[in-house]
Amino acid sequence: MEIKKDINQWLSAVLENSFDGIYITDGQANTIMVNKSYETITGLKREEVLHQNMRDLVERKIISSSGSLMVLNTGGPITLHQEFKTGKKALITSSPIYNEKHEIIMVVTNVRDLTEIYHLKVEVEKTAEQKKKLQQELAHMQKELLSGDMIAEDENTLAALRLADKVLELDTTVILLGETGVGKEIFAKYIHQHSSRKENSFIRVNCGAIPENLLESELFGYEKGSFTGADRQGKPGLFEVADKGTIFLDEIGELPLSMQVKLLRVLQEQEIERIGSTVPRKIDVRILAATNRSLEDMVKAGTFREDLYYRLMVFPIHIPPLRHRPGDIPALVTLFSNDLNRKYGFVKTFSNASMQILTDYDWPGNIRELKNVVERAIIISSGEIIHPDELPMIQRTEAPKPRLLPARYGNNLSAYLEEIELQYINDAYHTYGNVRDAAKSLQMSPATFVRKRKKNSPD
């Protein structure tokens, strides 16, 4: 009798401490037992359901449906999703227990938590929806951009364009950062062409190409008679020419310090002063700038004004080099090929192997180098299909040769591997001082360790 009592206590302890929720009803669907995992999974207290009939619990919306009732109706096990008034969800399996007369005397329900799975499902669906929306946005951008010289097939390029989109309709100063040849001017034109100033001038100024002694007159203009050789009528500068439009200051890191002071005044006051005049002139111009240099390092070196640096860095956009946007390369090659075919009257295309070589190359000169390579290949190729041997201008590195075995082994790889294995075995034995620990460190059984040690050791 005592043994039976102990067994019942043990069984109760097992049920109570089960990781899954356990819910038991009698043959009339009255609740006779729940465990603590059931409380945790459902958020219900056991006193809310104990001694309650399942029909009442369903009617009072404590639970959404009852597996016990279904089992009593069908006579067989049932699995279903169940929701509780607490908002939690579970997967339940209800199974009948029969007596010797084949009557259902109990229904045991196993309950597993689905709340976290539902949350994950919602998150996955939300992420999928966001991804779909992003793909639609990118497809719209690509359709719009690919109508011109702008190529945006790679995700890194699209990320830079999406950043540019945030300031298209604003007059914010934008500085484009990136290596030489990455297409900073194309980005600048894109910003202008999609801004409210698109009907007015876009003036590009290469700050590094204008001699320093002419730079001020070119940018700000001069009054008549200002200096020897000046136009008799005077001349407006490029900032005035760009009035109501956009001026793009390329290579702005090349501006001498004397010009940086004057540019800072334009940014702060939106006014310029011609050479030979003391009267400031108001202008309405948006300034875009670009550089391949580190302006921050130039500020530290004293070659670029700190106040101008902060004025320009209101909205920086980094344009990735071509090696970081390989997805753009096939489309760029196609764009350049089409232009050159029209120019020279050819109908040439690149083979798949040639296109792969172009895509894999690092392009230190970026888009400018790619365009030159495409043009040279089209000119020197003999047929309509351009093959890899017609791309000698690309320096390809040879694949590394496989490492040779030490000479004493010839081509006997097995012997070489056995020696390496023996070195590891001996090192492990010397380190741990016994077979058991040494074998464990090498994830071997002691027997295997001993066998390999004997086999590979010299006599």
Image (cartoon, grey):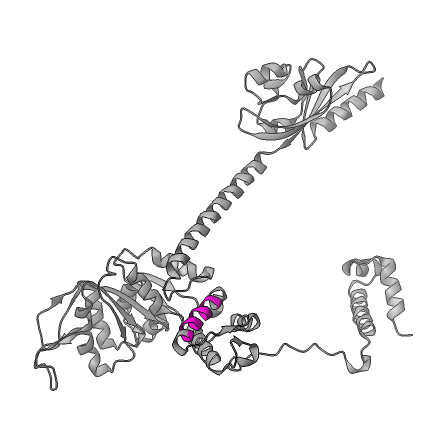
| Dominant secondary-structure state across the stretch colored magenta | helix
Left or right relative to 97: residue 173: left
Residue nearer the viewer, 121 or 253: 121
Left or right relative to 426: residue 142: left
Q: Is residue 175 in view?
A: no
Residue nearer the viewer, 80 or 380: 380
Question: In which quadrant of the rendered image does the N terminus lie?
Answer: top right
Give residue 203's position: percent from left, percent from top. Answer: 24, 70
Give residue 356's position: percent from left, percent from top. Answer: 55, 70
Q: Is residue 169 above or below residue 360?
A: above
Verify whether residue 340 appears in magenta: yes
Give residue 432's position: percent from left, percent from top. Answer: 79, 62
Count of numbered circles on the image: 0
Residue at coordinates 71% horizontally, 23% vertically from top-left? 108
Residue at coordinates 41% horizontally, 64% vertically from top-left? 151
Verify whether residue 305 appears in magenta: no
Q: Is residue 105 in view?
A: yes
Please give the range of residues in magenta. Answer: 330-341
Residue at coordinates 30% horizontally, 58% vertically from top-left? 194
